[in-house]
Image: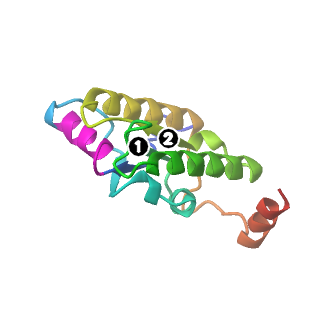
Amino acid sequence: MEKDFEPIIVCYCCQWCSYAAADLAGSMRLQYPTNVRIVKVPCTGRVDAIFLMKALEQGADGVFVSGCLLGDCHYLSGNYRAQKRVAYVKEILGKIGINPDRVEMYFNSSAMGPQFAQCCRDFTDRIRELGPGLRKGKKLQDRERMAARVAAG
């Protein structure tokens, strides 16, 4: 593996808690990797499984979803739905031969800026150990074959 490998990470953050935690981390001048691309969503319950898969397909080395603490979702159960979707994506990735550790779910309240920064550092370290994911220039698996493998279970 290259020593200079810096992973591309996509993070889907709910606007109420995790995005506020990211903002707090920035306000506190806490260090976390600059390669984490944050996508603000109204609720993690709106993050569909296809968003996670597409991010990986289009070159992200890892994707994580960061939502409200369980039981504290502003939309009641959005973070529970997101948690199920992340587990589903991990299952699919395992079936098609991609390490499921490339996808994760974290829970942060708006007051957890230091914990959010730590999640970013920990996840980036994990992906750095796994190495590059599907990148442009690497040959992607044939979509029909991949769909058939997932459908076959």
Q: Is residue 7 left or right of residue 89?
A: left
- What is the tally of numbered marks visible in this picture? 2
User: Which residue does the image show at 42% across and 52% down from the upper left?
Assistant: 44
The magenta segment: 15-26
Q: Secondary structure at mark 2?
A: strand
Please identify the dominant SS of the magenta region. helix
- Residue 41's mark? none
Q: Picture coordinates of residue 15 (x, y %)?
A: 29, 51
Whether residue 61 can be seen here: no
Percent position of residue 63, x then y: 49, 48
Residue extending farthest bottom: 144
Is the C-beta separation of discs 1 and 2 under 8 Å? yes
Determine the CA span between mark 1 and mark 2.
6 Å
For disc 1, the marked residue is 66
Amino acid type, label 2: Met
Residue on which disc 2 sits: 105
Left or right for 122, reference 84? left
Dot 1 falls on a residue whose secondary structure is: strand
Going 53% across and 41% down the picture, which residue do you hit? 104
Residue 34 position, x and y percent, is 30, 42
Residue 107 at least partly seen: yes
Q: Where 62 sits versus 109, above or below?
A: below
Which amino acid does the dot numbered 1 rest on? Ser
Q: Position of residue 69 (x, y in %)?
A: 39, 36
> Who comes first in sequence, dot 1 or dot 2?
1
